[in-house]
Image: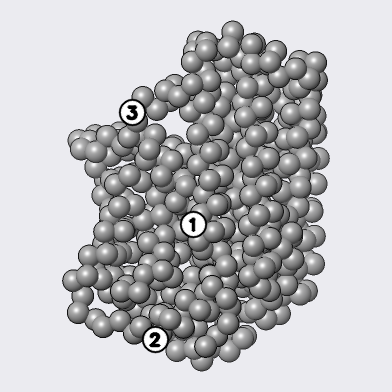
Amino acid sequence: MNLSNFIFFLFILSGTLIITYWAAKRVTTTQQFYSVSHSLTGFQNGLAIAGDFMSAASFLGITGAVALYGFDGFFYSIGFLASFFLLLFVFAEPIRNLGTFTLGDVIFSRFPEQRIRLLLGFSTIMISVLYIIPQIVAAGLLVHLMLGMNYSSSVWVIGSLMTLYVIFGGMVSASWVQIIKTVLLLSGTFLMTLMIMARFDWNILQLFHLVKENTPYGEQFFSPGNLFKDASEMLSLNLTLILGTAGLPHILVRVFTVKDARAVRKSIITSTWIIGLFYCIMLVLGMGAVALVGWERLIEVDATGNLSALLLSSVLGGDFLVAFISAIAFATILAVVTGLVTAATSSFTHDIYHHVLRKGKATERQQMQVAKLAAVCVGLLSIILSLSLKESNVTYLVSLTFAIAAATNLPLLLFTLYWKRFNSTGAIVGVLSGLSGSLLVVLLGPQMELLGNKMLIPLENPGIIAIPCGFLGAILGTLFSKKEVDEEMFTKLVVQAQTGVKR
């Protein structure tokens, strides 16, 4: 541990705790805990959505993927960015017009059945926890590098902090941590981009030329095929990334933090521009790492490429810049896991406890108490799983989470909003089919081969199988069900979803 690392770590920790203390004084109702009382502006929420989405996997992982595999690494960025257009044009405004706090509210507006709320509540918690695990694993390794703390202690520190933020600050704390994290991350990475370009006299062609010389791929570095030898693997990954975002609970619940559909539209447009700029920066950082650190050196230090951004910062600005970028990465992880815990906690308290267990009769005080207890439980579960999955492939866990979100929540939302024939049986069968398909690919895929079992499905990314399972389950469940469709309810739902006007 050096002094710079400790100072920046202390600065980030102090800042987030001050935000939580400030938020704790304002979070006195469930509306504030769940959705900031719908009080964020479109621009503020856009920054928060970007902060929720730009995870450690995006910052450290994509920089490394570009550095090691060139164009194929940039595929991750393309998939992530394209997903926001689907969110903008298909889902964001209808969800805000129909819901109040959670996805359960949206689906319940068409299918007023408690079993669907219960299923969605557990689905949200499962997806959130699965996404928290790789973030905490990455954070544990990062704190170990920054402060010399052992991995287990690092995980407990991160897990305790994220739980603390949610218990006292709820969505208010999560939102402002994410907003500040976005500003810090963009500032830090943009500074590194300027430093890279200055090394090459602001001539990007010089950078391209040196990259070609420093990689074993040569000209092929800028063409597909370095990472994904199989076209089906590439298709599966991009399908997962593009469709998965529209099913991620912690992203979708952010549409409830603004007052109306117009603000939602501004939120998504703002976040799309920010995320697009960020991924362009990642492209430059990845190539800068190859040109200035060297491809062989990147492989020698870390074959996964996850340390490429830190190695690059060391070349550009020494220990001081490494400490600064490490602290930003730490803030990035804190912001993302706080948003995930908030989404899981809100779903349990609002959908499962308040509506299913208490039949909508829980008081404000009871809901706040249960929300804080749920945050502790989610935090503990995430910490325990992260400790046991230290050696797991975090990139695979992220891909699996996106696949499950796309296979369960995506068909459910799409058919609820746009298919008149869709019914509650199809909704339940679709969610269960998507979940089963995702787990089946995992059990029969390369990850199980590592444990000594026979691999029957040679796919690292399960999306190409899991996502169709979710859609087919929803369609077949609907078509084979004898339930009649309430056309008048569907008409009312469509009008409200598209206009915000209740009939």
Q: Does dot 1 land on a helix, a strand or a loop?
A: helix
Q: Residues within 10 Å of mark 1 (few under 14, many from 20)?
A: many
* Residue 359: percent from left, percent from top: 45, 89
Q: Nearer the viewer, mark 2 or mark 3?
A: 2
Q: State left or right for residue 467 relative to residue 402.
A: left
Q: State left or right for residue 188 relative to residue 290.
A: right
Give the labeled residue for mark 2.
488
Badge 2 or badge 3: first in the primary sequence: 3
Q: State left or right for residue 61 relative to residue 236.
A: right
Per the model, the C-alpha gap separating discs 2 and 3 is: 48 Å
Per the model, the C-alpha gap separating discs 3 and 1 is: 26 Å
Badge 1 or badge 2: first in the primary sequence: 1
Give the labeled residue for mark 1.
246
Q: Does dot 2 land on a helix, a strand or a loop?
A: helix
Q: Does 213 sit above or below residue 2?
A: above
Q: Does dot 3 land on a helix, a strand or a loop?
A: loop
Q: Looking at the image, do the residues carrying marks 2 and 3 touch, with CB atoms under 8 Å apart?
A: no
Q: State left or right for residue 56 relative to residue 4.
A: left
